[in-house]
Amino acid sequence: MPKKKRYVYKSVYTSSNISKSGKKGKRFFRNFLFIMLCVAIMVTIYIAYKKLLDIAYSSDKMTIKDIKIMGSKNVTKTEIRELLPFNIGDNLLRINPSQAEKEIKKLKPELKNVVIHRSWHKVQVKLYERIPEAFIVINDELLGVDFDDMPFPLRGFMSAMKVPKLFYNTDKERKQLLDFIKRFRDVCEDFLSNILEIKMSSTGDIIFIINSNTVVFWGDEMPEHLYCKFNKFKKIYVDAMSRYKNIEYIDMTLYSLGRAIVKPV
Protein backbone atom coordinates (compact mmCIF):
# COMPACT_ATOMS: atom_id res chain seq x y z
CA MET A 1 0.00 0.00 0.00
CA PRO A 2 1.65 3.29 -1.07
CA LYS A 3 2.52 5.84 1.69
CA LYS A 4 0.64 9.11 1.85
CA LYS A 5 2.67 12.17 1.08
CA ARG A 6 3.16 14.62 3.92
CA TYR A 7 2.96 18.27 3.10
CA VAL A 8 4.82 20.96 5.05
CA TYR A 9 3.55 24.53 4.76
CA LYS A 10 6.07 27.33 5.17
CA SER A 11 5.44 31.05 5.49
CA VAL A 12 6.65 33.03 2.59
CA TYR A 13 7.51 36.69 3.14
CA THR A 14 7.08 38.83 0.14
CA SER A 15 8.74 42.12 -0.45
CA SER A 16 5.40 43.90 0.02
CA ASN A 17 4.98 42.54 3.58
CA ILE A 18 8.49 43.62 4.51
CA SER A 19 7.94 47.09 3.14
CA LYS A 20 4.65 47.50 5.10
CA SER A 21 6.22 46.54 8.42
CA GLY A 22 9.10 48.91 7.73
CA LYS A 23 6.73 51.75 7.00
CA LYS A 24 4.86 51.11 10.29
CA GLY A 25 8.13 51.23 12.21
CA LYS A 26 9.18 54.47 10.59
CA ARG A 27 5.76 56.02 11.22
CA PHE A 28 5.90 55.05 14.90
CA PHE A 29 9.40 56.48 15.22
CA ARG A 30 8.34 59.76 13.57
CA ASN A 31 5.31 60.06 15.87
CA PHE A 32 7.48 59.36 18.90
CA LEU A 33 9.95 62.06 17.87
CA PHE A 34 7.11 64.51 17.26
CA ILE A 35 5.62 63.89 20.72
CA MET A 36 9.01 64.24 22.39
CA LEU A 37 9.62 67.49 20.50
CA CYS A 38 6.25 68.88 21.63
CA VAL A 39 6.99 67.92 25.22
CA ALA A 40 10.40 69.57 25.04
CA ILE A 41 8.88 72.77 23.60
CA MET A 42 6.22 72.86 26.33
CA VAL A 43 8.78 72.33 29.08
CA THR A 44 10.97 75.09 27.62
CA ILE A 45 8.03 77.51 27.45
CA TYR A 46 7.04 76.69 31.05
CA ILE A 47 10.57 77.23 32.34
CA ALA A 48 10.87 80.52 30.41
CA TYR A 49 7.46 81.63 31.76
CA LYS A 50 8.50 80.87 35.34
CA LYS A 51 11.74 82.79 34.92
CA LEU A 52 9.95 85.80 33.41
CA LEU A 53 7.39 85.67 36.23
CA ASP A 54 10.12 85.58 38.87
CA ILE A 55 11.81 88.55 37.19
CA ALA A 56 8.50 90.45 37.08
CA TYR A 57 7.75 89.67 40.75
CA SER A 58 11.15 90.97 41.83
CA SER A 59 11.25 93.95 39.47
CA ASP A 60 11.01 97.48 40.90
CA LYS A 61 9.17 98.53 37.75
CA MET A 62 6.08 96.48 38.75
CA THR A 63 5.50 98.12 42.14
CA ILE A 64 2.33 99.92 43.23
CA LYS A 65 2.88 103.67 43.23
CA ASP A 66 -0.72 104.83 43.77
CA ILE A 67 -3.95 103.43 45.24
CA LYS A 68 -7.06 105.31 44.13
CA ILE A 69 -10.33 104.77 46.03
CA MET A 70 -13.51 105.97 44.28
CA GLY A 71 -17.20 106.00 45.20
CA SER A 72 -16.79 106.64 48.92
CA LYS A 73 -19.64 108.73 50.32
CA ASN A 74 -20.38 107.44 53.80
CA VAL A 75 -17.53 104.94 54.11
CA THR A 76 -14.22 106.76 54.45
CA LYS A 77 -11.25 106.12 52.23
CA THR A 78 -9.03 105.68 55.27
CA GLU A 79 -10.92 102.67 56.64
CA ILE A 80 -10.96 101.04 53.19
CA ARG A 81 -7.24 101.64 52.77
CA GLU A 82 -6.61 99.94 56.13
CA LEU A 83 -8.53 96.87 54.99
CA LEU A 84 -6.57 96.45 51.76
CA PRO A 85 -4.10 93.52 51.98
CA PHE A 86 -1.53 95.48 49.95
CA ASN A 87 0.11 98.89 50.11
CA ILE A 88 2.15 101.31 48.06
CA GLY A 89 5.49 99.73 47.22
CA ASP A 90 4.14 96.18 46.97
CA ASN A 91 4.50 94.22 43.76
CA LEU A 92 1.53 94.79 41.46
CA LEU A 93 1.45 91.20 40.23
CA ARG A 94 1.46 89.60 43.67
CA ILE A 95 -1.87 91.06 44.81
CA ASN A 96 -5.12 89.08 44.54
CA PRO A 97 -7.94 91.54 43.68
CA SER A 98 -10.74 88.94 43.85
CA GLN A 99 -9.77 87.77 47.32
CA ALA A 100 -9.42 91.35 48.54
CA GLU A 101 -12.91 92.20 47.23
CA LYS A 102 -14.46 89.26 49.10
CA GLU A 103 -12.73 90.12 52.38
CA ILE A 104 -13.75 93.79 52.28
CA LYS A 105 -17.39 92.95 51.48
CA LYS A 106 -17.43 90.48 54.37
CA LEU A 107 -16.09 93.09 56.80
CA LYS A 108 -18.18 95.96 55.42
CA PRO A 109 -21.82 94.87 54.82
CA GLU A 110 -22.68 98.51 54.07
CA LEU A 111 -20.89 98.01 50.75
CA LYS A 112 -23.02 96.46 48.03
CA ASN A 113 -20.00 95.73 45.88
CA VAL A 114 -16.25 96.35 45.64
CA VAL A 115 -14.31 96.25 42.38
CA ILE A 116 -10.50 96.29 42.44
CA HIS A 117 -8.73 96.90 39.14
CA ARG A 118 -5.02 96.85 38.38
CA SER A 119 -3.39 99.23 35.91
CA TRP A 120 0.16 100.40 35.28
CA HIS A 121 1.71 101.29 38.67
CA LYS A 122 -1.78 101.87 40.05
CA VAL A 123 -4.63 100.05 41.80
CA GLN A 124 -8.16 101.43 41.52
CA VAL A 125 -10.75 100.51 44.17
CA LYS A 126 -14.37 101.28 43.21
CA LEU A 127 -16.94 101.24 46.05
CA TYR A 128 -20.68 100.77 45.65
CA GLU A 129 -22.40 101.66 48.92
CA ARG A 130 -25.76 100.35 50.06
CA ILE A 131 -28.66 102.78 50.45
CA PRO A 132 -31.28 102.01 53.13
CA GLU A 133 -34.75 101.40 51.75
CA ALA A 134 -36.05 100.89 55.30
CA PHE A 135 -34.90 100.85 58.91
CA ILE A 136 -34.93 97.78 61.14
CA VAL A 137 -33.95 97.15 64.76
CA ILE A 138 -31.69 94.21 65.63
CA ASN A 139 -30.40 93.81 69.20
CA ASP A 140 -31.59 97.35 70.05
CA GLU A 141 -29.50 98.77 67.20
CA LEU A 142 -31.05 100.75 64.35
CA LEU A 143 -29.82 99.35 61.03
CA GLY A 144 -30.52 99.96 57.39
CA VAL A 145 -31.77 97.31 54.98
CA ASP A 146 -32.00 97.40 51.19
CA PHE A 147 -33.92 95.35 48.66
CA ASP A 148 -31.24 92.64 48.84
CA ASP A 149 -32.56 92.08 52.38
CA MET A 150 -29.09 92.83 53.72
CA PRO A 151 -28.96 94.60 57.12
CA PHE A 152 -26.06 97.03 57.51
CA PRO A 153 -24.95 99.76 59.94
CA LEU A 154 -26.07 103.31 59.20
CA ARG A 155 -23.32 105.67 58.12
CA GLY A 156 -23.18 109.44 57.79
CA PHE A 157 -26.62 111.05 57.61
CA MET A 158 -28.46 107.83 56.78
CA SER A 159 -30.37 107.84 60.08
CA ALA A 160 -32.07 111.10 59.00
CA MET A 161 -33.40 109.62 55.75
CA LYS A 162 -37.17 109.49 55.33
CA VAL A 163 -37.65 105.77 54.97
CA PRO A 164 -40.12 103.59 56.93
CA LYS A 165 -39.18 101.47 59.91
CA LEU A 166 -40.14 97.80 59.58
CA PHE A 167 -41.67 95.71 62.36
CA TYR A 168 -41.76 91.98 61.78
CA ASN A 169 -41.62 88.64 63.57
CA THR A 170 -39.71 86.52 61.06
CA ASP A 171 -37.19 87.03 58.28
CA LYS A 172 -39.88 85.92 55.84
CA GLU A 173 -42.16 88.76 56.97
CA ARG A 174 -39.28 91.23 56.59
CA LYS A 175 -38.73 90.05 53.02
CA GLN A 176 -42.46 90.42 52.26
CA LEU A 177 -42.48 93.96 53.65
CA LEU A 178 -39.44 94.88 51.54
CA ASP A 179 -41.11 93.46 48.44
CA PHE A 180 -44.20 95.55 49.21
CA ILE A 181 -42.11 98.72 49.60
CA LYS A 182 -40.36 98.03 46.29
CA ARG A 183 -43.66 97.69 44.42
CA PHE A 184 -45.37 100.49 46.35
CA ARG A 185 -42.55 102.94 45.64
CA ASP A 186 -43.11 102.56 41.90
CA VAL A 187 -46.75 103.74 42.13
CA CYS A 188 -46.82 106.15 45.08
CA GLU A 189 -44.15 108.58 43.85
CA ASP A 190 -42.91 110.62 46.86
CA PHE A 191 -45.68 109.52 49.25
CA LEU A 192 -43.39 106.82 50.64
CA SER A 193 -41.46 109.49 52.55
CA ASN A 194 -44.64 110.12 54.59
CA ILE A 195 -44.72 106.56 55.92
CA LEU A 196 -43.14 106.19 59.36
CA GLU A 197 -43.73 102.50 60.10
CA ILE A 198 -44.82 99.41 58.22
CA LYS A 199 -45.77 96.10 59.78
CA MET A 200 -47.78 92.98 59.04
CA SER A 201 -50.85 91.84 60.96
CA SER A 202 -51.38 88.31 62.22
CA THR A 203 -53.57 87.66 59.16
CA GLY A 204 -50.87 88.81 56.71
CA ASP A 205 -52.32 92.26 55.97
CA ILE A 206 -50.11 95.31 55.48
CA ILE A 207 -50.46 98.11 58.06
CA PHE A 208 -48.56 101.39 57.94
CA ILE A 209 -48.50 104.63 59.91
CA ILE A 210 -48.02 107.95 58.15
CA ASN A 211 -46.50 111.12 59.61
CA SER A 212 -49.88 112.49 60.72
CA ASN A 213 -50.05 109.43 63.04
CA THR A 214 -52.86 108.06 60.92
CA VAL A 215 -52.96 104.28 60.80
CA VAL A 216 -53.67 102.81 57.36
CA PHE A 217 -55.02 99.28 57.21
CA TRP A 218 -53.90 98.52 53.69
CA GLY A 219 -54.97 94.90 53.53
CA ASP A 220 -53.34 92.27 51.35
CA GLU A 221 -50.72 93.20 48.78
CA MET A 222 -52.67 92.53 45.56
CA PRO A 223 -49.82 93.80 43.32
CA GLU A 224 -52.02 93.75 40.22
CA HIS A 225 -54.37 96.33 41.84
CA LEU A 226 -51.69 98.40 43.56
CA TYR A 227 -51.78 101.41 41.23
CA CYS A 228 -55.57 101.78 41.25
CA LYS A 229 -55.76 101.12 44.97
CA PHE A 230 -53.20 103.81 45.79
CA ASN A 231 -54.96 106.38 43.60
CA LYS A 232 -58.21 105.62 45.40
CA PHE A 233 -56.50 105.87 48.79
CA LYS A 234 -54.87 109.18 47.86
CA LYS A 235 -58.24 110.74 46.98
CA ILE A 236 -59.77 109.43 50.21
CA TYR A 237 -56.86 110.71 52.29
CA VAL A 238 -56.85 114.18 50.74
CA ASP A 239 -60.63 114.45 51.16
CA ALA A 240 -60.50 113.24 54.77
CA MET A 241 -57.72 115.67 55.68
CA SER A 242 -59.80 118.53 54.28
CA ARG A 243 -62.80 117.47 56.42
CA TYR A 244 -61.18 116.52 59.72
CA LYS A 245 -58.33 117.90 61.81
CA ASN A 246 -56.99 114.47 62.69
CA ILE A 247 -57.73 110.99 61.40
CA GLU A 248 -57.38 107.91 63.56
CA TYR A 249 -57.30 105.38 60.76
CA ILE A 250 -58.23 104.66 57.16
CA ASP A 251 -59.29 101.10 56.42
CA MET A 252 -58.63 99.96 52.84
CA THR A 253 -59.06 96.23 53.51
CA LEU A 254 -62.49 96.23 51.79
CA TYR A 255 -61.21 97.95 48.64
CA SER A 256 -62.05 94.91 46.51
CA LEU A 257 -65.69 95.39 47.55
CA GLY A 258 -65.61 99.09 46.68
CA ARG A 259 -65.55 100.24 50.31
CA ALA A 260 -63.20 102.25 52.54
CA ILE A 261 -63.64 103.37 56.13
CA VAL A 262 -62.36 106.66 57.51
CA LYS A 263 -62.44 107.25 61.26
CA PRO A 264 -61.58 110.75 62.48
CA VAL A 265 -60.18 111.37 65.98
Image (cartoon, rainbow, N blue to C red):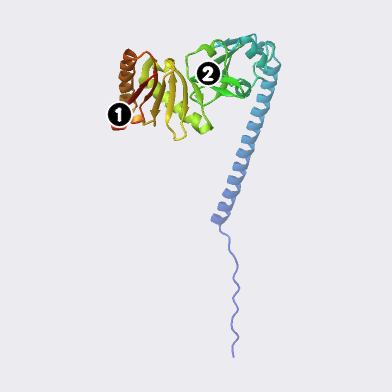
Q: Extreme top residue here?
A: 65
Picture quarter with the N terminus: bottom right
Q: Which residue is mark 2?
A: 130
Picture quarter with the C terminus: top left
The mark found on residue 25 in the picture is none
Label 1: how many Cα within 10 Å (few below 14, some 14–19, many 20+): few
Amino acid type for the residue under numbered disc 2 = Arg
Closer to us: 27 or 152:
152
Closer to us: 62 or 240:
240
Q: Name which residue lies at 31% across and 20% down.
A: 236
Say what secondary structure mark 1 lies in: loop
Determine contact: label 2, label 1, CB under 8 Å: no
The answer to whether 168 appears left or right of 8 in the picture is left
Q: Name which residue lies at 46% across and 24% down.
A: 198
Position of residue 186 measured from the top left corner of the image (x, y, whole percent): 38, 21
Give the mark nearer the N terminus: 2 vs 1. Answer: 2
Label 2: how many Cα within 10 Å (few below 14, some 14–19, many 20+): many
- Image quadrant in which you'd find residue 138: top right
How many tags in the picture? 2
In this rendering, which labeled residue sits more in front, label 2 or label 1? 1
The answer to whether 259 appears left or right of 19 in the picture is left
Closer to us: 99 or 183:
183
Amino acid type for the residue under numbered disc 1 = Arg
Q: Which residue is mark 1?
A: 259
Position of residue 129 measured from the top left corner of the image (x, y, whole percent): 54, 16
Separation of marks 2 and 1 at Cα, in angstroms? 40 Å
Say what secondary structure mark 2 lies in: loop
Position of residue 70 measured from the top left corner of the image (x, y, whole percent): 55, 11
Q: Name which residue lies at 31% across and 32% down.
A: 256
- Image quadrant in which you'd find residue 45: top right
Position of residue 121 measured from the top left corner of the image (x, y, whole percent): 62, 11
